[in-house]
């Protein structure tokens, strides 16, 4: 008997956004064994090409499954009180320097068991899936000890087993200086380089290593040490850079061949050029910009001029972006950063996948993994234009309809 994986499935008459462009006419899409076999214009389609295929649906807008390439989905506790403080005028940096912010999530996350973290994170994951996500990245960074960072990464991997979704994991040991290392940042960086990265690599728990290159995070020199250790262990590199100031963290990351530099509100032209030369993706995080009520805009026009691919992600986290709705991010990328709806959608599909080092995802093309979304809308731009739940008719993961 054919398993659901080997069943041939056919979508008819879909308006298709392939990850980069909207195709000019309604399309037929054939899927088999977890892959897209082919796509053809509906007009003049020869049904013998899809002999034996089961029609999965007809009509609607089809996009690649959404790729959320930057999240901090695993954490315990909440930071609603800090949100109120910020509304009263206290800055994110002031709260961080006083031991709140990231460190307050660290206290809650260290105290939580793996099962408690799973229970806290699953509803957030389910919200992302209900809005079309088929691949996401999850960072550690609220543990800041070897054991608790590995605990977060194990939880992230387990989430990927509990739901039909691809999870890539990133070690963010250099997210903040834990209190027990106060005044000894270089020693903490040694712990990240000499213990966390080797352990995460040995246990196969991390796909990449990230840093927070910032005045309230780590210096470029410290980030460079971490990148060297990551590369020595065969792990990809990413950066939180130029979020609150310009330390040249994106150019540094690019020099190390980083997959992406993320946030980048304060990025300058030299940084854009370095990213273009290295093929480093710019990950825009409009949720954090919105929640922190930032005013410094990322250099979108320069990124366009230099041809740097722009991804868009949720940055879902308890502090700067407690938002688990990727299509809202598409809307914010347009309204706040002036991306076009096409750019925003490419940012959440093809370019998001590149930011994770998986360019085969986030595309609808013959031979690509069949991670797809079918939406009850008239045209792809509506995903960025309207903010609404309940528009996802089908989520297809690895060729199988998992949400209908
Ligand atoms: O991407 N900037 C640093 N890291 C996160 C925020 C984490 C937090 O505040 O808990 C970010 O914005
Ligand atoms: Fe982040």
Image (cartoon, rainbow, N blue to C red):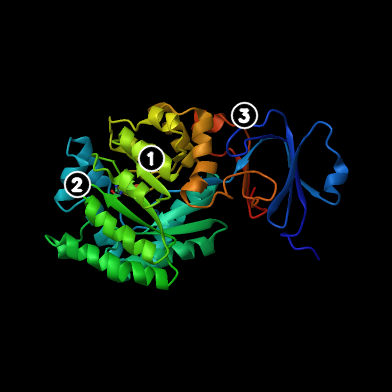
**Mark 1 secondary-structure assignment:** loop
Tell which circle, 3 or 2, labels the residue nearer the N-terminal end: 2
- Image location (x, y in percent) of residue 317: 35, 49
213 on left or right of 307: left
Label 1 residue near ligand 1, CB within 8 Å: yes
Q: Residue at x 39, y 55 (%)?
A: 237
**Mark 3 secondary-structure assignment:** loop
- Image location (x, y in percent) of residue 138: 42, 56
Q: Residue 192 lies in what quarter of the image?
A: bottom left
Q: Residue at x 50, y 32 (%)?
A: 343
Label 2 residue near ligand 1, CB within 8 Å: no
| Residue 285: assigned label | 1
Q: Residue at x 81, y 31 (%)?
A: 43
- Image location (x, y in percent) of residue 227: 33, 58
Mark 2 neighbour density, 10 Å: few (under 14) some (14–19) many (20 or more): few
Q: Residue 151 lies in what quarter of the image?
A: bottom left
Tell which circle, 1 or 3, labels the residue nearer the N-terminal end: 1
Quadrant where the N terminus sits is bottom right
- Are dots 3 and 2 in contact, CB under 8 Å? no
Foreground disc of the pair 1, 3? 1
Q: How far is mark 3 from mark 2, CA to CA?
A: 43 Å
Label 3 residue near ligand 2, CB within 8 Å: no
- Can residue 76 be seen from the camera position used here? no
Q: Which residue is mark 3?
A: 379
Compared to 207, does 251 lie above or below? above
| Residue 215: assigned label | 2
């Amino acid at each position: 008997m054919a398993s659901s994986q080997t069943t041939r499935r056919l979508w008819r008459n879909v308006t298709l956004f392939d990850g980069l462009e909207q195709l000019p006419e309604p399309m037929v899409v054939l899927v088999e064994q977890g892959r897209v076999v082919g796509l053809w214009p509906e007009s003049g389609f020869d049904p013998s090409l899809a002999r034996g295929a089961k029609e999965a649906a007809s009509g609607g807008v089809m996009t690649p499954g959404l790729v959320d390439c930057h999240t901090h989905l695993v954490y315990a506790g909440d930071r609603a009180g800090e949100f109120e403080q910020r509304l009263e005028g206290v800055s994110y940096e002031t709260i961080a320097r006083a031991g709140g912010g990231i460190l307050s999530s660290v206290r809650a996350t260290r105290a939580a068991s793996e099962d408690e973290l799973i229970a806290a994170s699953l509803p957030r994951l389910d919200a992302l899936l209900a809005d079309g996500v088929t691949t996401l990245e999850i960072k550690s960074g609220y543990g800041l000890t070897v054991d608790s960072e590995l605990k977060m990464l194990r939880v992230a991997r387990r989430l990927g087993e509990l739901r039909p979704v691809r999870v890539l994991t990133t070690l963010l040991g250099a997210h903040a200086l834990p209190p027990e290392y106060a005044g000894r940042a270089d020693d903490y960086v040694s712990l990240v380089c000499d213990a966390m990265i080797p352990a995460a690599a040995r246990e196969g728990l991390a796909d990449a290593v990230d840093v927070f290159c910032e005045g309230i995070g780590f210096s470029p020199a410290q980030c460079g040490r971490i990148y060297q250790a990551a590369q020595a262990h065969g792990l990809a590199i990413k950066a939180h850079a130029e979020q609150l100031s310009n330390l040249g963290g994106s150019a540094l990351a690019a020099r190390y061949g980083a997959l992406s530099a993320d946030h980048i509100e304060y990025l300058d032209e030299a940084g854009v050029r370095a990213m273009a030369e290295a093929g480093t993706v710019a990950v825009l995080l409009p949720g954090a910009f919105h929640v922190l009520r930032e005013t410094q805009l990322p250099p979108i026009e320069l990124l366009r001029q230099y041809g740097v691919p722009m991804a868009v992600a949720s940055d879902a986290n308890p502090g700067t972006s407690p938002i688990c709705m990727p299509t809202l991010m598409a809307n914010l990328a347009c309204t706040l950063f002036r991306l076009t709806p096409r750019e925003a959608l490419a940012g959440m599909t093809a370019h998001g996948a590149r930011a994770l080092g998986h360019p085969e995802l986030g595309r609808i093309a013959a031979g690509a993994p069949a991670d797809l979304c079918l939406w009850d809308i008239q045209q792809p731009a509506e995903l960025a234009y309207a903010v609404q739940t309940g528009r996802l008719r089908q989520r297809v993961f690895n060729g199988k309809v998992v949400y209908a």
